Amino acid sequence: MKKSVPKKAPANLTVARDTTKHPIQPSSIADAVSAAISLPNNNGNIDIDALSIPTNYGERFAVTKVLSNIPVRKPHKSAFIRVKQGDEFLIYILEDKLSGVTYAVMPQVAQLVPESARAVRLHRAVDRQGNQLLVPVPLPGEDGKRNVWHESLMVCLAKAEHKWVRVAANLSAGAYDLYVAQGELGEPEWTDHTMRELVEIAFRGKVISEEKDPVIQQLLGRI
Amino acid sequence: MKLASLFPNGVFAVDFEFHPINGVEGNPPRPVCMVVRNLLNGHTTRLWRDELLQLDKAPFPTDPSALFVAFYASAEVGCFLELGWSCPTRILDLYAEFRCITNGTTPSHGNGLLGALLYFGIAGIESEEKASMRELILSTGPWTPQERRDILDYCESDVLALSKLLDAMLPCIDLPRALLRGEYMSTAAKIEAAGVPIDVPLLHKLNAHWGLIQDKLIATIDKDFGVFEGQAFKSARWEQYLIRAGIPWRYLPSGSLDLSDETFKEMTRSFPQVAPIRELRYTLSKMRLASLTVGEDGRNRCMLSAFRATTGRNQPSNSRFIFGPATWIRALIKPSESTGLAYIDWAQQEFGIAAALSNDARMMEAYTSGDPYLTFAIQAGAVPPNATKQSHKIEREQFKACVLAVQYGMGADSLALRINQSVAQARQLLDLHRKTYRKFWVFSDACLNEAKLGGRLWTKFGWEIHVSASTNERSLRNFPMQSHGSEMLRIACILATREGIRICAPIHDAILIEAPINELDTAIERTQQLMAQASRLVLNGFELNSDAKVIRSPDRYMDDRGLKMWNTIMELIDEPKYAQ
């Protein structure tokens, strides 16, 4: 039983992929199809290599991680850190022990509260998780000397320029102990930020620039 | 650009009606009739079985100048093979394309032809009518003249539906890569036709004694555990066993033990002593030996269900396919006389894919070292550079668990359970992975961004997943690895089939091939070369290694995970144990 029934051909068998839904398609479907199906010397087989498309995930969206918070503090005693050589910044800071907030203080205001505001050198550091931090080390006093804590911290940070180190306070010795990682942990990855940009991020909304600032007024016993 | 200019010799919508030979599941298809319609000129040809048998080739061109259109084409190609016709070379399978277009979503009427028609707003044959026609065809005949006309009309209605569906789908079909998927459907038909050789006398013996075996199995295996009461698994007893054995187990939020097979499977990796209970539970609850579809020629055949999984992988029925979850049953695989089998799998495929797709140099270095787990431990600084598998066995196992945990998207809690260490230690391992393979993690984040912002991910050969708000983040991160693994397997199967290598089954990251014993080594070598080529095609030139497990007649296949269970069962039916 064989029946051949001529019927009307469908109106339009056109290859025109909806590129709004599928943006990765080649600009010329016809070329791609031809390339895939009619390459010479391939025994009529589809040339698989000619069919590959890029898997450039995320490129068109260019999502980047924004560095929005940088702590200003000594590294945690359990964290290994590295310090970036030459990335330093001189600044007055004021640590509010009650709130745990560290402020940047303009020099003219710092002079009003010399017991609280300290001139420090900030060192750029990063831990093993890639978290950035700024480590403050007080500048030497007028006599050019530092106390043992600060001196030992400087030694630790200098070592951290070349090695992954851990810094832990040793109360009985009155100084920081330095631990150097034994494994080859690889080099840290630094972001492209300049030191100034990092400082701006770290102290965003935490800059004391005038005497009437509530923090200064409180320290002066005026409120 | 019209299809006519790409395929000047015609675009043919084709449908066969068929049933398994002698109505026995596992036998190849017996074509009943075929209807073909040339969509370029509207000519329709209807052929009944006796007419088909008179032809030594298809009654339409099957060379690259013509396009063969079908819905689930491996069925049609299976009929071609049975008729001894040469197979079409350019296939557009609207099932595969419908899956690709809708993958990640749930079409309200399913993924069948009717579901696809309704998805595009096209009315099709009523599902009740379709079911009754299928029943009539599966009855294997003989059919009255009226029934024959009805069957041909039904077959033609599917061809007409197919042509309407093609019209609706064509604008969103990625034709070059659709043709590759079409070739895989043809390859799948050849694999299904080959089937897996089974030790049929032993299968019959197992079937005959199955009721008795189950009771004996419980008595034999449970004597080490004491967790069954009759045929019932008791969770309270299992909890007591876990306490006695010092095995930490996962609990559900409800407070009861998580007794899912997935958890058993995961725990088996860390605590192999629970494997027999997992196998026993599966064997008792889900496995029906009689469901295994073995043809009269002793070959296990079932539909591979290509492209059914979200990742694009095959998803054959667990109970019909010999490579279903019960691993002991795989020992029924036995090459026929004078032939051999080889189970060839890519080594650490997922790790290699992740390394290559992310272009993470350290990860690629770990892969090419041959022991990525130990190399990872060295790279992370956890063991010295001269560490070996023997000198740092425990560390290697932990780093291996960490790699697998990342692949499965496990958190620190699950990893801790798996390595039987503290959560802090597990967290540290996961941290080390992030630090050591930074570029991989940037890639992983980019996948997530692409999926969440762009709404889809795709493979190098165009398999897609469409993302909804509820799509699991873990699945999205893992999709590129799984789906490229799936592409790699399909391409390897295509390449091997093109060269005439007989593939019995594709299994996740492996291929089971068969050859006469004197040709087996050559076939294995060539298959491994083609698998390497497939990996290079998928991974921008990066090559994955493969391992071959060879089974020569009269030996049988054995999966180590099922060895104990198999030997126990063989003891129960007085058969010799499998020696290892």
Image: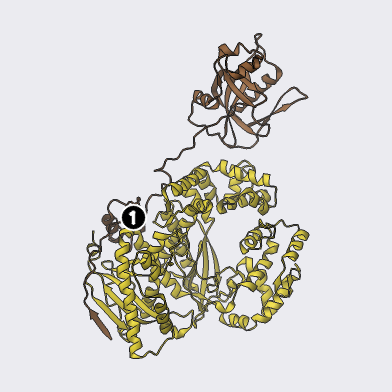
Chain colours: A brown, B yellow
Task: Determine whether the residue tagged by mark 1 lies in a helix, strand or loop.
Answer: helix
Chain bearing tag 1 is A
- Front residue of B115/A37: it is B115
Q: Position of residue B436 (x, y in %)?
A: 56, 42
- Report which quarter residue B111 is drawn in: bottom left
- Front residue of B97/B86: it is B97
Q: Which residue is mark 1?
A: A50
Check the image and report above or below for A193 versus B18: above
- On the question of residue A47 being in view, the answer is no
- Front residue of B327/B318: it is B318
Crowdedness of circle 1 by 10 Å Cα count: few (<14), some, many (20+)? Answer: some
- Report which quarter residue B493 is drawn in: bottom left
Q: Position of residue A145 (x, y in %)?
A: 67, 12
Quadrant location of the C terminus of chain A? Answer: top right
- On the question of residue B501 being in view, the answer is yes
- Front residue of B180/B371: it is B180
- Report which quarter residue A1 is drawn in: bottom left
Check the image and report above or below for B173 versus B202: above
Q: Position of residue B309 (x, y in %)?
A: 48, 63
Task: Judge from the rendering whether residue B109 lies leftward or rightward of residue A72; answer left or right.
Answer: left
- Mark 1: which amino acid? Ala
Q: Position of residue B175 (x, y in %)?
A: 32, 60
| Residue projecting furthest to the top | A143
Check the image and report above or below for A127 versus B365: above
